[in-house]
Amino acid sequence: MAQVKGKKAGFGAVLWDYLTTVDHKKIAILYLIAGGFFFALGGIEAMLIRAQLAIPNNDFLSAGLFNEVITMHGTTMIFLAAMPLLFAFMNAVVPLQIGARDVAFPFLNSLGVWLFIFGGIFLNLSWFLGGAPDAGWTSYASLSIASPGHGIDFYAVGLQIAGAGTLISGINFATTIITMRAPGMTYMRMPLFTWTTLVAAILIVFAFPPLTIGVFLMIFDRMFGSNFFIVEAGGNTIIWEHLFWIFGHPEVYILILPAFGMFSEIFSVFSRKRLFGYSAMVFATVLIGFFGFMVWAHHMFTVGLGPTANAIFALATMAIAVPTGIKIFNWIATIWGGSIEFTTPMLYALAFIPSFVMGGVTGIMQAAAPADYQYHDSYFIVAHFHYVIVGGVVFALLAGLHFYWPIMTGTMLSEKLGKLEMVIFFIGFHCTFLIQHWLGLWGMPRRVFTYLDGQGYNAANMISSIGAALMAVAVIILLINIIKTLVKNEKVGRDPWGDGRTLEWSLPIPAPYYNFAQTPLIRGIDVLALEKEEGDGTIPSAGPVEPIHMPNNSFIPFMISLGLFIAGFGALYFASGKPWAIDAVADLPVRPWALYVLIAGLAITFISMGVRSWKDDLGYYITKEELEADLRELEARERGAN
Amino acid sequence: MAEMRYNVPNDQWPVHPEKATLEGRNKFVGFWTFLAGETVLFASLFATYLALKDQVPSQDHLVAAELYHLELAFVMTMFLLTSSLTSVFAVYHMRNNNFGKMQLWLGITVLLGAGFLALEIYEFVEYVSIGHTFRSSAFGSAFYFLIGTHGFHVIVGLIWITLLIIRNANRGLSVYTAAKVNTASLYWHFIDVVWVFIFTIVYLLGVL
């Protein structure tokens, strides 16, 4: 099991390595590339939306195409960009933060990323195979059952495949953080990013199954002739809304909590201070996760659940402001009196506080159920959720990208370009979405493909579109920065920011594939900062150099995911032209091969799973001699660098 | 080298062989986490079923009270509950390092599970023959989806345990195979617990 080390490997070997890898650091790269690709795709869709809405009575996009673009923008950004990019940072950082050699289930980690990639490709193939889904990212059943063609089917099957990957990753991270912590890394010494990852992982475990069921109901209704949402046969479309939002609301916390975690790290590092109120931060994180499951019906105030239900959900929603407020004040108190360094990540973190608070405040406005009847389905809502998702999650992703770039690639992004990107993105963001609050209050409904002249919407929409273009410019600057940095390829050493406080910054860069040659001993919170203050900044070891058990690479995760991808096409075309099918697909040509494709795909998946269970996968050992040789080489390299 | 770590000598057989290795402990925690997710999955199914119970397009469609027979559901329950007990015996013998008896009780578990599955198939065929199908009404869809998802779990469990019996036949017991058997047994118990809820919420509430 020799690792490719030092010498240059051929393209084929590298490709095969990434297709079969179970190393969390390489899987992080896969998540980053795939998530970054989908982020660009979702961004292009956003530009199309703003181009269409820039002027009244525009015919840049047709009404139908506009619906497809907004649906794919939302779906892509949430499921295929934001979550995978967060997974990229979790994979790259969390095992290093807790002193683990890998995640608890390296095989499942690989399965998770391939399911996500195949699900994302499946969803986006809709553009080339008869039209994308067009019922909004929420895909309410009353719309989606009536949507002609196979667009919605791509949404349902694609999300099912990608969602399975997310669920698996959630289980993996929850288990990793519970069982794989190094000696001394107690729960209350875990860095905040690890804590928020743990809570987000548990939220995934409880929130994704309702989505799975909801999407199955949709799949069965559209592809196999069932009647869950067919009102004439006794069905009920509100079931979808409940299941979707029981998933959908925790989902926004799944996104924002790791973002909070990253900002907590960044504030602490660049204020050169311990995080203020650590235990209150942990408590608030858990509380937000807990409340997250009790508020889903605030998305459904206008459905008509009755005043009692609305009142309960309104109160529960407002209660979430309390732990979130605790966090905001703790961040401010962390900065307070700190020795602040204005790096790119820190600038994003500083910009995040006011931006996110604005999104939070409009959230509380909507939590008041009677007032929500006014805001519902207007641009006010669009403004609100972009303030929390972009001002919170995307800021965190961009900050995290700059912050953790050295750990992931061994190089440092240009700070000059980074700051330029941050300033332009910040201005563009507020320019795009601030004005949309007023657009909403003036009565512009969301999801309309155009508006008439002379209603007072023209200037505001133009301002919003200009802002969107600015954000695109910022992202292009980021891309230039990335390309320049990768081409220059100037390697950095340990602790490149100079103020790293947690365990991941104590490792050499790039970290060896086994992460820690000796299991570290954790003596307190912010362990690296502690060891810097009390000693020479080296982390003590919990034991001698011992052989390390490592998992084998495997191609099976790719095969399992490929099987579901193939089966997806069988399911998708199964109902085409069948007499029992819903009206939306009953007129399409019959595909007699669909059933066989479905069976063949599922067979590939289940046989691959059987093979996995059948074979002994005992892994391999890195010997003590190899480890000692590595350590000597590292020591020589670092002495040479100084 | 790896081989040696997993095959523990008889006199050093741990009390909890399934948790003797780091991989085993991970499997244990991870699988419980997975079952937490499965619980929510079935909760969503139960909620869907209750919302669509007896929701049929017209009065000539069959509803719950006319369909269910508690006698059949009772026999099915006995099959499945007993199979859960036999899987406990299998794990008991696994902890005592008694490979032969473990295999035997796993085999009995599979037979009882297969008996349950046969009765379920019989029930479905009966219902379909009198016009209660997956496509006949929203009630039908919800019924078959809930019971069918449980039945699918039973099928997966049966194949899984059968594969384990065959694959372990030549390998014998080690802390590596013990973790696999224990995980399958946890899964089988979970299927059983879900059935208890199905019996109460679907069949008992259906005929009351």
Image (spheres, coloured by chain):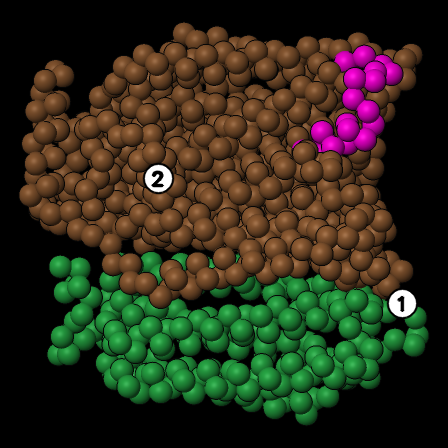
Chain colours: A brown, B green
Residue B101's spot in the image, x, y percent? 31, 87
Residue at 54%, 70% (x, y): give it.
B153
Give the residues drawn in magenta, as a range: A54-72
- A265 left or right of A392? left
Q: Is residue A473 visible?
A: yes
Q: Nearer the viewer, residue B112 or B89?
A: B112
Residue at image position (77%, 27%) is A66
> Is the residue A619 above or below the residue A640 in the image?
below
Query: What percent of the width, then of the height, locates residue A277?
Result: 40, 35
Q: Quadrant of residue A410?
A: top left
Chain to which the residue tagged by mark 1 belongs: B
| x 88%, y 75%: residue | B61
Residue lying farthest front?
Answer: A592
Residue A427 place in picture, x, y as percent? 59, 11
Please state which of residues B186 and A246 is positioned toward the viewer in this rendering: B186
Quarter of the image with the C terminus of chain A in it:
top left
Residue A38 colored in magenta in the image: no
Q: Is residue A595 left or right of residue A492?
A: right
Q: Name the one closer to the observer, A582 or A395.
A: A582
Q: Which residue is mark 1?
A: B57
Which chain is mark 2 on? Answer: A
**Residue on which disc 2 sits:** A16
The three-letter code of the residue at mark 2 reads Trp
A526 is higher (above) or lower (below) than A162: above
Viewed as shown, does residue B44 lie left or right of A61? left
Secondary structure category for the residue under label 1: loop
**Number of the label disc, if any, that sits on residue A254:** none
Q: Residue at x 55, y 52 (%)?
A: A564
Q: Classify mark 2: helix, strand or loop.
A: helix
Q: Is residue A57 magenta?
A: yes
